[in-house]
Amino acid sequence: MTDRPPVAIIMGSQSDWETMKNAADTLEALEIPYEARIISAHRTPDRMVSFAKNARDEGFKVIIAGAGGAAHLPGMTAALTPLPVFGVPVQSKAMSGQDSLLSIVQMPGGIPVGTLAIGKAGAINAALLAAAVLALSDEDIAERLDEYRERQSASIAEYPMDNL
Ligand code: RP5
């Protein structure tokens, strides 16, 4: 077991980072260490197999995988590791992310990928789900997650205003 952070954020391309950085920022707000890597199911298949097969032994606990278009990365990663995998459909240019969403969400029974919303909201929520998983066995993370949600509730005005 090496000393990896609990969360891996993997993505199919540098172009996915703009979206996936929202997951990273959310984990940082919760003080949860992560490692972000570019791993393409299509362009670097050997890197994907090596990462996914070793992820648990290296100490990762949860994987967030973002990809766009024919988005095989989350599903293939889930096929190669017993760790929980949360998939983020990146908004593609051709089909606004509908292709990414369907590629990730329609896993055959037996290999699950927890699929989030397309784009930024999905990346943020993938990080919050990862935090919720870790919080089950880490009281400090549980406390920070509670505080995050309390801050969020406090930031929402009760009444709408004109001319904000
Ligand atoms: C996928 O193809 C990546 O996840 C990315 O969303 C999409 C486009 O990649 P680039 O052509 O921008 O590298 O593999």
Image (cartoon, rainbow, N blue to C red):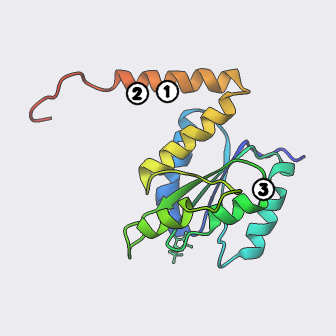
Label 3 residue near ligand 1, CB within 8 Å: no
Question: Horizontal placement of 145 versus 158: left or right?
Answer: right
Q: Is residue 98 visible?
A: yes
**Residue 25 picture location, percent across and down:** 52, 44
Check the image and name the residue furthest to the left: 162
* Circle 3 or circle 2, nearest the eye: 3
Tell me the quarter of the picture where residue 11 sits: bottom right
Q: Which residue is mark 2?
A: 152
* Circle 3 or circle 1, nearest the eye: 3
Residue 92's disc number: none
Position of 89 relative to 155 (above/below): below
Position of 122 relative to 161 (above/below): below
Q: Amino acid at mark 1?
A: Tyr
Check the image and name the residue furthest to the right: 1
Question: Horizontal placement of 73 versus 158: left or right?
Answer: right
**Residue 88 picture location, percent across and down:** 53, 56
Q: Under tag 1, what secondary structure?
A: helix
Q: Earlier in the sequence, mark 3 or mark 1?
A: 3
**Residue 105 picture location, percent across and down:** 54, 59
Label 2 residue near ligand 1, CB within 8 Å: no
Query: Image point 47% across, 26% down: which residue?
Result: 149
Check the image and name the residue furthest to the bottom: 43
Q: Earlier in the sequence, mark 3 or mark 2?
A: 3
Q: Which residue is mark 1?
A: 148
- The local crowd at label 3, few if under 14, some if 14 to 19, many if 20 or more residues have their Cα within 10 Å, is some
Residue 81's disc number: 3
